[in-house]
Image: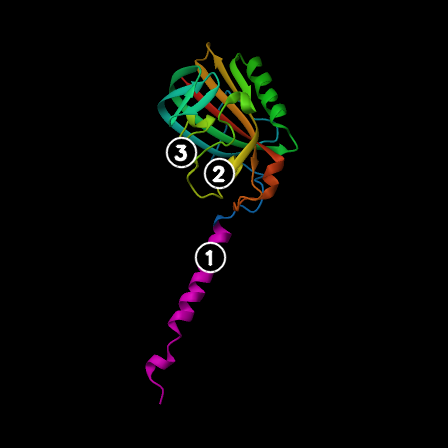
Amino acid sequence: MNSNRDKLPNTRFCNFLIAILTVCLANTAFALDDVPTQDAPNLSDIASVKRYEGAVLVWRDDVNYDEITFPAGRVSYNNNVLKALKTDNRSGSRAMLVYVAPAGRSTLEVMRSHQSQLKTDGFKVLFECADSACGEASALTGGNNFNFANMLFKDAAFSTSRSEAHVCAAGAQITGFRYSLLDNTKTGETLAVMTWRPLIKGYALPCPDELEKHTSVMVFHVQK
């Protein structure tokens, strides 16, 4: 007669099946399979900043009051210190938004569209740069917070699952980076607009390679 132990499923085999199911479910739940085509739930634009036509809002983070150091000159990283040749300091309510523009639009096209609209609305360009002229701009974020954008925020903003839409939009590395700092003295608003193309292929990211055909946009807004 077989013992009760003989009738129980093989423990190692069960554990193996559980492990396989866990991996499959994780890949299904956390992999971003397609380029986002709709805004993330419960997100909205800043009232005074119009999005690029056809862009999709994938992330927004708000703080009631913050102090921000905006780069207004080339950014360098020396002796573990990230520093801009010139800065503009602002304080007030802060919002940080990430968009994905339609495929085939260059980072320059998207940037110029934002600048044109913002100038019409009373904003003045204080500083702008592109690629190497910006300084440390080969990536949006970095493990040691040593990239251009880290003057504005730390990597914690992108330390969630590497397959969330805004993290995929950041890419492992970036190309075509552009930055513009604008100010509206009448409304007390200051904002930075950043555009870039994310690099996905070859970096083992659970993100769609098609994102490389899309310009990513970040709007960093401070209201006095």
Using the rendered view, name the quadrant where residue 51 is placed. Answer: top right
Provide the secondary structure element on which disc 3 rests.
loop
Q: Residues within 10 Å of mark 2 (few under 14, many from 20)?
A: many
Q: Is residue 152 visible?
A: no
Q: Amino acid at mark 2?
A: Val
Of tags 2 and 3, the one toward the viewer is 3
Quadrant assignment, res 53: top right
| Label 2: element kind | helix
| Category of crowding for the residue at label 3, using alpha-carbon neighbours closer than 10 angstroms: few (below 14), some (14–19), many (at least 20) | few
Please indicate, yes or no, whether residue 77 appears anywhere in the rendered image: yes
Q: Secondary structure at mark 1?
A: helix
Is residue 25 rendered magenta in the image?
A: yes
Q: Nearer the viewer, residue 212 or 143?
A: 143
- The residue under the point 40% across, 74% down is 10
- Vertical comparison of 76 with 159: above or below: above
Q: Residue at x 51, y 35 (%)?
A: 170
Report which residue position mark 1 lands on. Answer: 23
Q: Earlier in the sequence, mark 2 or mark 3?
A: 3
Q: Which residue is mark 2?
A: 167
Residue extent of the magenta highlight: 1-29
The reply to whether the C-beta atoms of the residues labelled 2 and 3 are less than 8 Å apart is no
Spatial distance from mark 1 to mark 3, Cα to Cα?
Answer: 29 Å
